Amino acid sequence: MEGRLTFVKLSTIAFLAMAVLASAALLVKSLFAAPAAEIVVATVNGDDITAEELAYFAGLHRASVIETFLAEEVVAMDTRFWQRDFRGVSPIEKLRELALKDAVAMKAELQLAHELGLTSDVSYASLLEAMEKENARRAKAVANGEPIYGPAKFEERTFIDFYRGKLATLSKESLAESEFAPMDERELVSFYERISTMLSPMANSLTYDKIAITYRYDGKDGDNRMEEAFRMATVIRERLLTGEAATEAVLAEAAYPAGMAAAYKEKLELNESNASRMFKSNNSLYTALQAATEGQPVTSVIDDPIAGQYVIARVTDWQAAEVPKFEEARDVVRKLYVEERYSAYMQSRVESAAVHLLPAYYESKLGVE
């Protein structure tokens, strides 16, 4: 009898153990079968980063990662590419690393905005909900014949840039008189002396040629189109660096993946009348043009997510502008001072953030496999 009771107890324990193991297996299976919006791959100061969020940022780096690794070694762009070992690191690992860096930076911005009472939620899902609400508002305005600024409908990428920019502006305004205020006028003058030659809009007037390769069709971006457009832009830029005329670089058939084309405009001007507008609306192009020199007149490949295109520019002529006096540029100087302080402040928040990677991070495919 005692032996039978023991058998029953052991059978019960074995049954329970099997049930637990089966439940665990189902849990793991359901985890990786769950929608990307529900899979948490990391936390930043306790707030979740989802697989969907990570994949979004991965999409921004996909083309450049491919170009970087293919430039190191001539290999086939096949199903094994992302897992292939390149001197101890695989493309998928590099892509995760870059995506995580961007995701952490955005989470830090959202957390600051939350602390300042500018937003009630720091999740990626809430950001997408905000996009849907904004698109509904814009659709209603268009239907009623009311004016709107910007696109009639935001795509995920353009809205995130818009939303982050808006929150950054509001955060800077909230902290401008406390965290970011100069100690006194002498500190502001010292800052002016350091950046006076880079002041906007009183900067160099210049003439440039611009080549744009569109990756957005029918209002949508696609990973393959972005990769092809980036590769095309890179080839054209390399031809420009050799001294080839812009028209020849654009018309060269070797530069074009199937079904793609480039738009070319020449003798465009950046001067005092439009510098402020470009500084605000297309800062990447503005900064690249200002950084161009006679020895390096060709810019890098610039992403313009608002227009959905990659841009390369070559400066053909410069006309130096006079550096404005401090009294004339004081408001601009103070704004740039706050910008610099905000950037340093956000960088310190990112560096001090408690980032915890979960197992799902290392399993994330990022939409490339």
Image (spheres, rainbow, N blue to C red):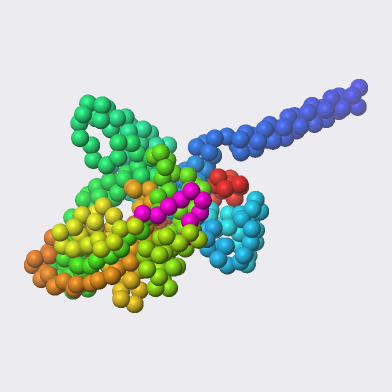
Does the magenta run of residues contain 206?
no
Asked if one can make out residue 76 in the rendered structure from this viewpoint, the answer is yes
The residue lying furthest to the bottom in this view is 295
Residue 78, x across and y down, in percent: 64, 53
**Figure check: 21 above or below 239:** above
Identify the image quadrant of residue 211.
bottom left
Asked if one can make out residue 340 in the rendered structure from this viewpoint, the answer is no
The residue lying toward the viewer, choosing from 47 and 275, is 275
**Figure check: 24 above or below 213:** above
Residue 238, x across and y down, in percent: 45, 68
226 horizontally vs 160: left or right = right
Residue 325, x across and y down, in percent: 10, 71
273 horizontally vs 97: left or right = left
**Figure check: 51 above or below 76:** above
Residue in view at x 33 percent, y 36 percent: 153
Residue in view at x 83 percent, y 28 percent: 11
Residue in view at x 26 percent, y 26 percent: 143
Q: For the magenta stretch, what is the residue range?
A: 255-263
The residue lying toward the viewer, choosing from 223 and 158, is 223
State the quadrant of the N terminus: top right
The residue lying toward the viewer, choosing from 125 and 2, is 125
Q: How many marks?
A: 0
Identify the image quadrant of residue 185.
bottom left
The residue lying furthest to the top in this view is 1
Residue 331, x across and y down, in percent: 13, 60
Q: Main secondary structure of the magenta part?
A: loop
The residue lying furthest to the left in this view is 327
Does the magenta run of residues contain 258?
yes
Residue in view at x 80 percent, y 31 percent: 14
